[in-house]
Image (spheres, helix red, strand yellow):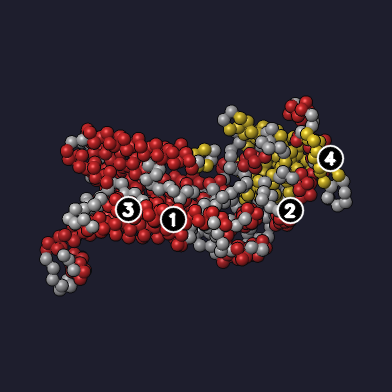
Amino acid sequence: MIAPKQVLAIVLNAIGIDTGIPFEDVQAEVLLSLRLPRIVLAVLVGAALSVSGAVLQGVFRNPLVDSGLIGIGSGASLFAAMYILAGSFVPVLLSGNPSLTLAFVAFVGAGITTATVYRISRFQQSIHVTMLILAGVALNAICGALTGLMTYLASESELRDLTFWTLGSLGGATWGNNLILAVFVVIPFFFVVRLSRSLDAFALGEQSAYFLGVDIRRTKLIAFVCTTAMVGASVSFVGSIGFIGLVIPHILRAVIGPGHRNLIVLSAIAGAILLCLSDLISRTILMPTEVPVGIITALFGTPVLLVIIIRQKKRLFV
Amino acid sequence: MILAENISFALGKSSLLQRASFRFDKPEFVAVIGPNGAGKSTLLQLLSGFYKPTTGSVLINGKGTHLWSASEFAHFRAYLQQQQSVFESFTVEEVLMMGRTIHFASKLGLADRLLVNQTLIELGLVERKNQAFNHLSGGEQQRIQFARTLLQLKDPSSESLAGKTLFLDEPLNNLDLYYQYNLLQLARTNVVEKQGTVIAVLHDINMAYQFADRVIVLSNGNTICDAPTEEALHPELLSRVYGMHIQKHESEHRTAYFSASNALPQSAVSNRKESLLHY
């Protein structure tokens, strides 16, 4: 157990301020190398998932879209799995850091699936929603099957790494990985915040946005690159965690309205809080066993989603 | 000023518009009429830069449409599309503010807010300001979308819309008789009388007759006629284009009206394309 004031003392101590509150070295070690990096990881991933949900829903003009539906998650998982299996044959790509390479490879995989789904669903200058959903389902199935196939080719230790993707876990948090993830999340975040005005115009349709003076190609390119970077990197570190990207923007729109500037910024905050809480529950609900955090987010994400759908139905038909 | 030289447009194998040339260089209300599938919307989309012509070129103020950046271009032309849905519950005011997209960076300035408010008053929709756009009736939505396009062209520092064009693609959809007149009247007073150009796809020949200075008649992707209204809306030409017996009934002022009756015999319709080309 670490008391709240001890938490403060340890953190202050770590940055060189002595508070005089007593704590043990083990407590400091647990907090600084296990708990804190894990919280930071939850904050980054939660923000990444819900911000990319908000942005993609704006671009596709559909509240059902999130990084899971259009295959960003499964594309990233597939490529990450391929890298784990074939990684020993491939030279480490960037700066000799395997985590960075993994994040990058996942980003590429996410980019390929997103681009494919977008191309298939696009018809005569607009997005065909049924096509979008069908293409997403198909690509998710292919990526899932290929990832599953790889588990048969994997060795014992590789298998453990692979299983971790399908379930999603924040257990592997380290400061080094957090730093890499922060780069992949924070920079794209500032780019997508700058897209807010263009995304608002997208609400009128792509063509109208163009007539209003929005560079639609550039907007979509930035939106896709940024969301795949954010989600791809997140997936490479924590596996696939569903529902956050779907639920958070939905709730926020109902509360603060659909304007993208506030929506994106608050999505980041709310997503971060939600994933931290989910992780807390996942660690404590069946102590000492840890429930995969994806199960927790799905468990309370789905009822919220259902409530929203029912409310929308009432609004439309009553 | 818009100059279209010999433009053709094809999607895949189907040719939607053939060798059309137009010049729009003065304040006027131009109506584009013709049967369904004649290429009217395609023409508007080419002139407004959304599509690039397969052959030929469209110059706006001397510069090819594809050379303009989207934001620069938006200062010179606005476009009201057919049937538009708005994603999520943006309010009426927010939809109008979207009309000012190119004029602000992150927050709308005072001058722009005043313009939006003034527009709400002119439309008589002030009390709808904070309502969700999607909850309004089709007619109200159409009027607000129209106002949004007017807002896009407005300049708080100058009354003149010289060199600017407003494209209207079937702007009278969902409007009752009163607002059909009202909308076209607003287009005249807010654009043409301020030295701008209006190019509108209309289905109602009577409306075209009453509001247009010039009419372009399209059929099967061909330009049948591009002339002052009185000349272009000739009952004989219209009868051939639409394959119906169309009569013009003269009355006082500019309220002559057209009536259509029984379709022309099949023989006249089947070869209407050839006969039109020789008209």
Circle 3 residue? A299
Dots 2 and 3 on the same chain: no
Q: Amino acid at mark 1?
A: Ile
* Secondary structure under the numbered disc 4 in the rendered image: strand
Dots 4 and 1 on the same chain: no
Tag in front: 4 or 3: 3
Say if mark 1 contacts mark 3, CB within 8 Å. Answer: no
Circle 4 residue? B247
The disc numbered 2 marks a residue on which chain?
Answer: B
Say if mark 1 contacts mark 2, CB within 8 Å. Answer: no
**Dot 1 alpha-carbon crowd within 10 angstroms: few under 14, some 14 to 19, many 20 or more:** some
Circle 1 residue? A308
Mark 4 to mark 3: distance in Å? 69 Å
Say if mark 4 contacts mark 1, CB within 8 Å. Answer: no
* Secondary structure under the numbered disc 3 in the rendered image: helix
Mark 4 or mark 2, which is nearer the start of the sequence?
2
Say if residue A288 shows up in the picture.
yes
Mark 4 to mark 1: distance in Å? 56 Å
Tag in front: 1 or 2: 1
**Dot 3 alpha-carbon crowd within 10 angstroms: few under 14, some 14 to 19, many 20 or more:** few
In which quadrant is the C terminus of chain B drawn?
top right
Residue at the location (50% across, 56% down)?
A314
Say if mark 2 contacts mark 3, CB within 8 Å. Answer: no
The disc numbered 4 marks a residue on which chain?
Answer: B
| Picture coordinates of residue B3, whole percent (x, y) | 67, 41
Q: Amino acid at mark 4?
A: Gln
Q: Amino acid at mark 3?
A: Leu
| Picture coordinates of residue B164, whole percent (x, y) | 66, 51
Circle 2 residue? B177
Front one among B214 and A296: A296
Q: Is residue A28 left or right of residue B43?
A: left
